[in-house]
Structure formats: structure tokens, C-alpha cells
Image (spheres, helix red, strand yellow):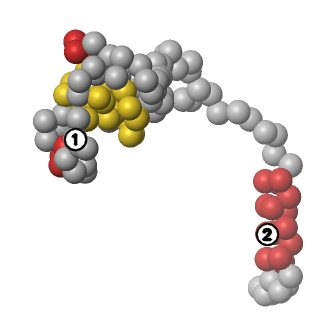
């Protein structure tokens, strides 16, 4: 029996490579079913940001009683912190008007 020529392996590899390059492009169908509609929250988007200067009724906000749980210090005199529409805001304690929007707060921690 005669040994194979040293370039026989190179020729075989080239043929396999060309076969892979010229194979027809097929689109896999598994996992491409239509996805159900998704709300903005399940898509990872935050709800609408409350507007600065907007007055918020007490039934639409959660007064933050433990600011440290949100990484905050005590609010300035006459202000308070609250959760409004999924956002942490600083409010005027007297009239509930939003003074600043701090960041999204997806969970109430206190």
C-alpha cells in the first residue's frame, strides 16, 4: 500500500470548505413564531416621566418614609420624596408639586 500524498489532506479540506461556502442559505424556522404584544414595561422601557411643576394628588403618589433605602439623605427643609408613576421624585411637602425627577424606581422599598 502506498502512503497518501502530503497534499491530499489540503485538497480534502479545501473541498469541504468550498462545500460549506456554496451551501444554500436556509432560514431556520424554529423559534421564529410571532411574539405576543408587549407593554412598555415588559420591553424594559420606563413609564412616562412625570413633569416638573406638576401637582400630584395624594392618591397617585407614595410618600417615601425611609429615604436611605433609595440611597438618599433626608430631603431639604420643606421638601419630601415620593414615588410617582414609577419614578422617584422630590416634591414640595406643602402642595405636592414635583420639584425634580430623580430616577426610575420600579419598586417601592419602604
Front residue (pair 83, 43): 83
Front label number (2 vs 1): 1
Position of 66 compared to 30: left or right?
A: left
* Disc 1 element: loop
**Which element carries disc 2, helix, strand or loop?**
helix
Residue on which the image places disc 1: 77
Left or right: 28, with 61 as reference point: right
On the image, the x and y values in percent for residue 51 come to 46, 24
* Horizontal and vertical percent position of residue 10: 83, 76
Where residue 50 appears, as percent x and y from the top left, is 43, 24
Q: Tell me where residue 83 sits by quadrant.
A: top left
Q: Quadrant of residue 58?
A: top left
Classed neighbour count for the residue bearing mark 1: other residues with Cα under 10 Å, few (<14), some (14–19), many (≥20): few
- From where the camera sits, is residue 101 visible? yes
Q: Residue at x 27, y 20 (%)?
A: 95
Picture mark count: 2
> Within 10 Å of the Cα at label 2, are there few (<14), some (14-19), or many (20+) other Cα atoms?
few
Instruction: Point out residue 101 in the picture as x, y percentages from the top left corner.
Output: 40, 35
- CA separation, marks 2 and 1? 77 Å
Quadrant of image for the N terminus: bottom right
For disc 2, the marked residue is 13
Amino acid at each position: 500500500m502506498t502512503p497518501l500524498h502530503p497534499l491530499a489532506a489540503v485538497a480534502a479540506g479545501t473541498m469541504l470548505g468550498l462545500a460549506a461556502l456554496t451551501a444554500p442559505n436556509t432560514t431556520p424556522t424554529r423559534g421564529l413564531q410571532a411574539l405576543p404584544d408587549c407593554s412598555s414595561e415588559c420591553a424594559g422601557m420606563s413609564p412616562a416621566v412625570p413633569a416638573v411643576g406638576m401637582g400630584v394628588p395624594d392618591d397617585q403618589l407614595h410618600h417615601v418614609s425611609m429615604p436611605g433605602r433609595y440611597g438618599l439623605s433626608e430631603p431639604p427643609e420643606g421638601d419630601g420624596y415620593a414615588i410617582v408613576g414609577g419614578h422617584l421624585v422630590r416634591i414640595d411637602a406643602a402642595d405636592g408639586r414635583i420639584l425634580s425627577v430623580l430616577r426610575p424606581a420600579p419598586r417601592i422599598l419602604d
